[in-house]
């Protein structure tokens, strides 16, 4: 019999763990799907890990791990993938904003040969206007940069074991799970779902963390910003040729430009271009620096009893 693993990253979700594990277990039993639930507590400061342990003790199909500190949702997803043993893996949020009802649909598509089933949001759920606008802008830019339409995509998806292995073998540290499945290819189908209300607690994203996430993802997936530096260089060279000709002609005609206004403006514009370019290049150097250090994506400090000890060597 085929098994389905479900990866659930959780950061300070003590109220959601008991509820979500119960809802999912009952739901999957009802649909006759053989499952395992893998909760990854992303360095939670509340009782999330204790709740995971409790759930694991009560149901042998539940297991989990605790990170030594908060490493972010991406790391949580990858650690979860690493601990799964099922033939197919679903990644979903543990606040039940991703409706379990979509899982049997994904499962059916997988049984019929799909290797990746993308969960596509049919609407974005209840979000504040500011969040909607900034998320909309982020996805517009990202879609342009990586040439994949990202707007309705999410981290809610089903992956075949083959695809999971491909993702786990990627050597990079700065991953962007949502786009990587598009990058990997494979036979892809989609399931639409409606984003639900969060069950308990609040969203874990601050504006700052979203901005950092956006910039990191954009630069880890595209070198277009670097080419922007070249474009700025070309623009300044063209501008300088025109100005040089104009200045020389005026000088030869005996009425050279008066005052500092032009000089100040040019210095400011060129200075701005140079600073911006340095910033962009610096950002890529930072990414390279992080990758070269080769530090692990996450550190696991505890695992529940069900987790096989020999995974240790593979914890990246
Ligand atoms: N999450 C995580 N680490 C973090 C932030 C969030 O594992 O640093 C988890 C969180 O527990 C939840 C999922 O990622 O299961 C989505 O987070 P959240 O619901 O806060 O985001 P939103 O649904 O508002 O986009
Ligand atoms: Mg949520």
Image: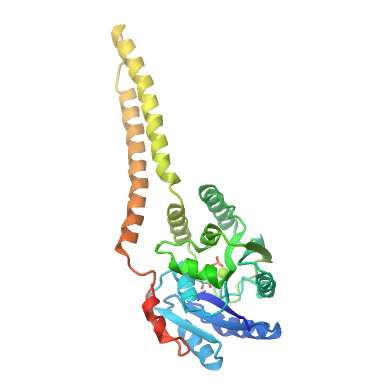
Q: Examine the rendered structure and indicate whether residue 261 appears above or below residue 193.
A: above
Q: Which of 139 and 191 is in front in this view?
A: 191
Left or right side of 59 for 228:
left
At which x and y percent is residue 78? 46, 71
User: Which quarter of the figure has residue 192?
Assistant: bottom right
Q: Examine the rendered structure and indicate whether residue 51 appears above or below residue 203.
A: below
**Residue at the (59%, 52%) spot, across then down:** 149
The reply to whether residue 62 is in sight is yes
Q: Which of 104 and 71 is in front in this view?
A: 104
At which x and y percent is residue 102? 67, 71
The reply to whether residue 120 is in sight is no
At which x and y percent is residue 266? 34, 28
How many labels, in total?
A: 0
**Residue at the (39%, 25%) spot, across then down:** 239
User: Which quarter of the figure has residue 7?
Assistant: bottom right
At which x and y percent is residue 19? 60, 83
**Residue at the (62%, 58%) spot, across then down:** 152
- Name the quadrant of the N terminus: bottom right
Q: Nearer the viewer, residue 43 or 87?
A: 87
- Name the quadrant of the C terminus: bottom left
Q: Examine the rendered structure and indicate whether residue 94 appears above or below residue 247.
A: below
**Residue at the (55%, 82%) spot, across then down:** 37
Q: Which residue lies furthest to the bottom in this view?
A: 58
User: Which quarter of the figure has residue 270?
Assistant: top left
Left or right side of 120 for 10:
left
């Amino acid at each position: 019999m085929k098994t389905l693993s479900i990866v659930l990253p959780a950061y300070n979700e003590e109220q959601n763990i008991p509820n979500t594990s119960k809802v999912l277990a009952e739901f999957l039993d009802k649909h006759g799907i053989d499952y395992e639930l893998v909760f990854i507590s992303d360095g939670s400061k509340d009782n999330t890990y204790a709740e995971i342990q409790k759930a694991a003790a009560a149901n042998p199909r539940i297991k989990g791990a605790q990170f030594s500190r908060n490493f972010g949702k991406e790391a949580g997803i990858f650690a979860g993938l690493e601990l799964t043993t099922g033939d197919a893996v679903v990644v979903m949020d543990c606040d039940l904003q991703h409706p379990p009802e979509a899982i049997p649909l994904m499962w059916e598509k997988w049984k019929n040969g799909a290797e990746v089933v993308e969960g596509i949001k049919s609407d974005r759920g209840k979000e504040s206007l500011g969040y909607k606008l900034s998320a909309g802008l982020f996805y517009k830019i990202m879609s342009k940069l990586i040439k994949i339409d990202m707007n309705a995509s999410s981290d809610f998806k089903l992956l075949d074991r083959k695809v999971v292995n491909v993702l786990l073998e990627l050597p990079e540290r700065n991953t962007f799970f949502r786009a990587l499945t598009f990058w990997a290819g494979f036979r892809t189908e989609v399931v639409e779902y409606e984003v639900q209300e969060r069950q308990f607690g609040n969203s874990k994203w601050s504006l700052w963390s979203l901005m950092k996430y956006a910039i990191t993802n954009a630069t880890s997936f595209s070198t277009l910003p670097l080419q922007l530096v070249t474009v700025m260089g070309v623009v300044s060279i063209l501008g300088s040729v025109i100005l040089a000709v104009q200045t020389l002609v005026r000088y030869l005609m005996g009425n050279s430009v008066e005052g500092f206004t032009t000089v100040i403006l040019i210095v400011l514009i060129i200075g701005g271009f140079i600073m911006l370019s340095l910033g962009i290049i610096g950002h890529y150097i930072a990414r390279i620096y992080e990758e070269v250090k080769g530090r692990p994506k996450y550190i696991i400090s505890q695992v529940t009893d069900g987790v096989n000890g020999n995974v240790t060597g593979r914890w990246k």
